[in-house]
Amino acid sequence: MTEHSEESFEDCAQRDTGAESWLLEEARKMRWLLLGVVFLAALIGVLVVFQARLLASACHKVVMSGEGVASIMSFAGILILIAAGRSLCSYGMEVRSSAAAARIKQTVRSTLYRKIQSLGPAGLAGNETGSLIETVTKGVDELEHYFTRFIPQLFLAALLPLMFIIVIVPSEWRAGLMLLFSAPFIPLFMILIGRGSEKLHRRQWGRLSRMAGHLLDLLQGLPDLIIFGTAKKEATVVARVSEDYRIATMAVLRVAFLSAFALEFFATVGTAVVAVIIGFRLLGGNLTLQEGLFVLLMSPEFYLPLRNLGLSYHARMQGVAAAERIAPLLARPLPEGFAGTLPAPDGPPAVSFEAVSFRYGGNRGGVTGFDLELPPGSITALAGESGSGKTTLARLLAGLARPESGRILINGQDLTNLAPDSWRSRLAWVPQTPYFTSGTVRENLLLGRPDADENDIHDSLKAAAADQFIGRLPHGLDTVLGDRGAGLSGGELKRLALARAYVCHATLVILDEPTAGLDAENELLVCEALERLAHGRTVLVISHREQTLTRVDRVAEMIDGRIERVVSPSIFLTPWENPV
Amino acid sequence: MNQIIRFLKISRNQWRWMAAGIVLGVVVVIANTLLMAVSGWFIASMAVSGSSGAAFNYFFPSASIRFLAIARTVGRYAERLVTHEATFRILAELRVWLFKRFEPLAPACLERYADGDVAGRLRADVDALETLYLKFVAPLAVGIISIITGVAFLACFSLPSALSMLFFLTIAGIGLPLVISRISEQPGRQAAQLSAALRNKVTEGLQGVEELILLGAVDRQAAVVDDLSEKLVAAQERLGRINAFSLGGMVLLAGSGVVSVLVAATTQVAAHQIPPPNLVMLLLFSAALFEAAGLLPSALYLLPVARESASRIFELADAPVPVPDTPVSGAVPFDNGISFTNVSASYFPGVPVLHTISLTVPPGGCLVLTGPSGSGKSLIVEILLRFRTYEGNITVGGIEISDLAKDAVHDLIAAVPQRPHLFNGTIRDNVMLGNVLADEEQLHRALYDSGLDAWVASLPDGLATQVGINGSAVSGGEGRRIALARALLKNAPILLLDEPTEGLDAATEREVISRLQSRIRDAKETTMLIVSHRPACLTLGDSVIRL
């Protein structure tokens, strides 16, 4: 386990440069907004200098010259104005940086989402949908602080200390030199300690999410734990896992906090040394209180940008981690083989698979040297164990992926030569879990053909045996469904999906397990709808359910990505004493 | 605040660590403010004695400066370690507490959290509760104690300065954050809703991308996502502007606070009420004290979110136990027969699912229950497991199951529930859960009888293969067979199987059923109740009831 996480860390480290340069490229696009942020911060720096000068002068007047309130009232007035100015600048700075962040997030998300969709499942092999969703939503949000915190701090850490040292040196060069020489130690120590702890840190985040998952895993599985009588025992496991986590994490934190310690140490001790130097120069009468106090007030300000840079290190890590997931997706080339131009044929097509292979790069669920004919207007069922490549085959026929070798002929024409849009408009596909969105039944029904008229809608609902349950809904077709079609049962959603396929006027229909998970009554309704849908169309249906198989012309049985046999349903369904 | 008090009660065993973290936090703030105060007083006094020629004992202040500088840095390091130590100790307490509270509630009360998306929210809620001390309790306590101590220190030297600082610190530390959290409430809620909506649309769009491509609806769906994203980003930007306002306000208040001290202390110096160098001391102390006020806003902004998370969790944990446990009694069933007499039950009160059902499974018999979905097949399994209440009589071996302790019932029964859970671990871990004492032979027998042997043998890692979170690395049919093997391994007198062959293809289903049949023949004394709508399963029973 440990070795594994080390490896994945090394991978991340290698990709680091790519992700960071992508981030900087994005920042360059926003350079005017970001420059505005830096300019305002520099303006704040100027105001800080004036504030320190005025405070020092006021103190000098009161302490050394013994003047009263009246003589410092003008100072007080200007100091209030400066405070107001600083406040306005900070406000403007924050507003600008959140505007920049908003624009970056919006463009990145929009580009990324469209890119992922156009890559399609064929181009995304190896990425889990869950992690893609996470990247598009939370991942993009996590870029924000890289641009609003880290990048401005990077500029300020270079700019402000230099600016401050220029005004300090004329007042008291010894203190100025002290600050100048202590400053480089801060980034140096931070880098030295940060390098070591970053590795530990990353591993720790991984461990944290594993541990958070552990409790959730146990809670979700509580019924099973109860059935097997181990629930009470697991409470001690929860305690032990949390305890192990605490010990391991604290060991890491003791090192990780050292970088902050080094930072604070140099900044605080530096300020203290400046105070002592100034004190003795004042005692010797070589310096006025006005100058001395000014330098003392400026020295914490000198270290502040460096400390802020240190604090924004976490923002950088978070941004880079998100960019490591986003940049490679954006850079990925679009899949090839989708540039055909010929129009798809009208009428039910004849389909012929010739030695088609597609292996995903892995072994499970691919097809190898696959041959099959689908005569025009026929219904063919594809049966076989799970993992034998049925769904892959359906996706190849739909043109969602291209064969690695071999070809698929449509009325004798290679599928890759057909224009993708034209082919898709002839096609209806009902996957295992059809797509439904929150919206009305009508919107969901007309996804593929928003311009269908009432007659088409009526016919399709009737054909799919969906008219009755829709008639019972409170607002009929205008009933609003929840997420993923919540509000309708599984069988009802299947029939609605069939109606959607029907309304499309497709000439080729592909159905993936239309009756899986349905009870007998719903299965019957769906099967009848299927027969009506098949009329005048070429149909490929993936199923191993008897009810469905009795209604097809031929059954093609797949084993391990190959056709085992193509037989009539009656032969396929002969009693199971027969060896298969 | 009730939720916060409740949280503190749960983690009260760690009060020493919590208190130590807060004390160290206060030490750090005080060391820092004193460092600035002493430095200011020191240089002002040095300047005065330098110009007047009077002697000044500089040994004490310069030593204090060095001491305070070190106290601040070391204290800060120690504070971070101690507060984190406290957080992790609290985390352990909370997790055990949560687990123990949820255990008797399963599964009925946790059904809301069965969905992956809601599980994510539970996780976020637990996270929020776990960091409550680090992000809310500690900074709030440190901020308030430091402000009070700091103002008291000022009052020892200059009452007017102390009062004016108290005014500005209260506005900066409490007034401003309260106003800010009030005005950010609405956009905050909006951002949370939009973020959830965006997540939903992205999930739909990516899961259904193939269908959307084929329907020619990809661009339309992407436009919906763009629109939501734009609204979300706008709400986040609004929150950013409110944050900007709060930062600007803090800067203005800090600047004004220092000016007020300058005027107040100067008045006193001019009236010879305080020595002149104290002016510099008071000014620098006040400027540094705003650091303490700066701790409060982020803690206070967190409060509404934390309170909401905490009340969601406490509400869940406080739910009444759906099926109260029975104290351990001496009653021992005399055989493995099951009998239902006029049993009625429901998932939700007022929506009856089972009406006066009566059925009997003789000891060693096997009954198959079939019927359309929604007819209450699975409910029968759940009431037998004492997961839900019932009316009427259910006896096992002549004893009413509600008179048996839950543990005693679970000793008698092994089950594959409707939605078995696979734990994130290896196949071996998941099967061995059924009986941790089983030997290799028993394990392999259970795998064989569930039709898993060939599949496991074909895996490169065999039994050590990880099943993934919620069994995501295995197919639905494989997961169900792992759950079946787990139930078979327990070798209990009664076996309940809810759709044991769901998700299997015909060939595998045939194999599993024929192996189960031979197992039933071998284990004559096991009473079995099988729930299924698959025709193939009907052959397993010696009687079939259609609901």
Image (cartoon, coloured by chain):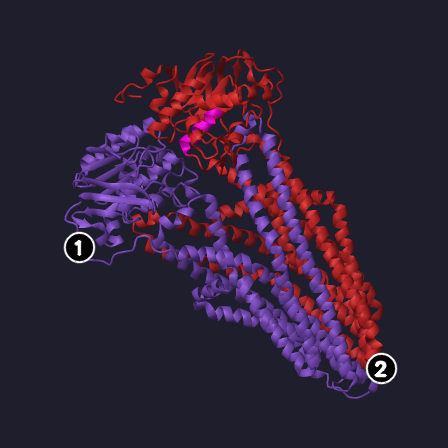
Chain colours: A red, B purple
The verdict on a common chain for dots 2 and 1 is no
* Mark 2 residue element: loop
Where residue A132 appears, as percent x and y from the top left, is 55, 39
Amino acid type, residue under disc 2 in the picture = Ser
Residue receiving disc 1: B331
Q: To which quarter of the image does residue A187 belong?
A: bottom right
Badge 2: chain ID? A
Q: Which residues are magenta?
A: A489-499
Query: Which numbered circle lies on residue B499?
Result: none
Where residue B167 sits: x, y (%)?
67, 73
Task: Check if residue A334 falls in the magenta segment.
Answer: no
Residue B354 at x, y percent in the picture: 28, 41
- Identify the amino acid type marked 1: Ala
- Between A452 and B311, the residue placed more toward the observer is A452
Which residue occupies the foreground of this view, A331 or B505? B505
Q: Secondary structure at mark 1?
A: loop
**Which residue is denoted by mark 2 in the rendering?**
A65
